[in-house]
Image (tube, grey):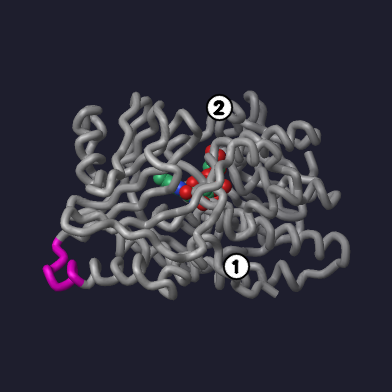
Amino acid sequence: MRTQVGIIGAVPAGLLLSHLLHLRGIESVVLDTAHARADRIDDSRGCARAGHDGSADSGRRRRAHEGRGRAASRLRACVRRQAPAHRPHRTHGPLDHRVCAAREVIKDLVAARVAAGGALRFGVSDTSLHDIDTDKPSIRYRHEGEACELQCDFVIGCDGSQGVSRASIPQALQRDYERVYPFGWFGIICEGPPSSGELIYARHDRGFALISMRSANVQRMYFQCDPKDSVDNWSDDRIWAELHARVDSHDGQHVVDGKIFQKNIVGMRSFVSATMQHGRLFLAGDAAHIVPPTGAKGMNLAVADVRLLTKALNAFYVDNRTDLLERYSETALKRIWRAEQFSYWMTSMMHRIEGASPFEQQLQVAELEYVTTSRSAATVMAENYVGVAVRED
Ligand SMILES: Cc1cc2nc3c(=O)[nH]c(=O)nc-3n(C[C@H](O)[C@H](O)[C@H](O)COP(=O)(O)OP(=O)(O)OC[C@H]3O[C@@H](n4cnc5c(N)ncnc54)[C@H](O)[C@@H]3O)c2cc1C
């Protein structure tokens, strides 16, 4: 089989790229190891907390996310410094942003691709990349028991942090940067009413907590934990006690319990592959970079990569220009490092750091106090949280 752009990985970067290319008349085929379509979405990924970095605009303009407006709720983020002796404070910054479940975004994208007759191959296995340093790269894979080959002009690796694309770049050419955090997030999804009309970020001496709303009846909550802990150690009662301890406050804010139907633990790391291109292979999304989820930037960074690639591939096919493709890594990395810095900063400010000295703990509290009381500091935070403008041309 032959196509113009072969895309590895169907959620969410690969699906959006395929759809944006389709709207410009550029053909693509998307391959994914997962079996079903929307049903296979990994719920451990939580919500797309913000439609920033242009992801909401992309969706609106390309009509790829038609259902997203229905699923989304407009919330105002609120940062709480949660300590028994202090009243929590709200930020003053313009933190209005759009919140929607990643699951809904992906469902809408799959539906949009299917409605447009897009080529999606789910349930592939043994994916491998070939001749990526020539102008005739190909992807080999197995599908429904058959050995297949997809010949293309470009391969786009949207296959996440564990995919084959980044691993196909020769080791000697890879330039990676990584930080692994000594804590993780315990995540739950429960049925029940929202605890608040706002996102709640809480820092407590027991650790960080985040309360978000997936829909009017389903809630997503996280609290900082040992990444090596096991969900089996956490009964529902113990989870609610921990969330109440970290979030409830004397000003009437409290977590509303519900029926927990999913629990998981995720580790946290920051990672950047500074080699986002090799020959005709381009990496996008988590295949190239990971941010700790505190700043809610991961999916939004993936969407921003895809927008750049769409522009660059369009310039190639329509105007025979290669300059945007050649500058892809350099252009994308400016925005990625900004988001990495912000996510690292927010993570460091909001989490309990084991082994931190009393002096360091006081510095952390002072910083949070500043962000939640100074309009200037809150504005800087808001600008980064909802998407900072980084020049891309
Ligand atoms: C707890 C948590 C909360 C988060 N909250 C937010 C948030 O609020 N806002 C936000 O913007 N981001 C958030 N994120 C980050 C976000 O989920 C990711 O950044 C985003 O899913 C990355 O999308 P992607 O398309 O790059 O990769 P992925 O979502 O990792 O998708 C990769 C796809 O590639 C497929 N694949 C892998 N290997 C192969 C192969 N060999 N062949 C074919 N297919 C393959 C996989 O099956 C998968 O479907 C959160 C993440 C976590 C863990």
Label ID, residue 12: none
The verdict on residue 266 being magenta is no
Badge 2 element: helix
Which residue of the protein is positioned furthest toward the left in this rendering? Answer: 358
Quarter of the figure that contains the N terminus: top right
Report crowding for label 1: few under 14, some 14 to 19, many 20 or more residues within 10 A (C-alpha).
many
Residue type at numbered disc 2: Asp
Tell me which numbered mark, 2 or 1, is placed earlier along the sequence: 2
Whether residue 323 sits left or right of residue 331 in the image: it is right
* Image position of 121 with respect to 227: above or below: above
Q: Which element type, helix, strand or loop, lies under badge 1?
A: helix
Q: Residue 85, how many percent across, how many down?
A: 16, 57
Q: Which mark is residue 332?
A: 1
Residue at (40% x, 28% y) in the render: 192
Left or right relative to 210: residue 307: right
Q: Which residue matches tag 2?
A: 39
Instruction: Calculate the distance from the C-alpha at mark 2 to the C-alpha at mark 1.
Output: 31 Å
Question: Residue 166, position in %: x, y?
Answer: 53, 55
Pick the front one: 159 or 22: 22
Towards the viewer: 161 or 191: 191
- Residue span colored magenta: 355-362
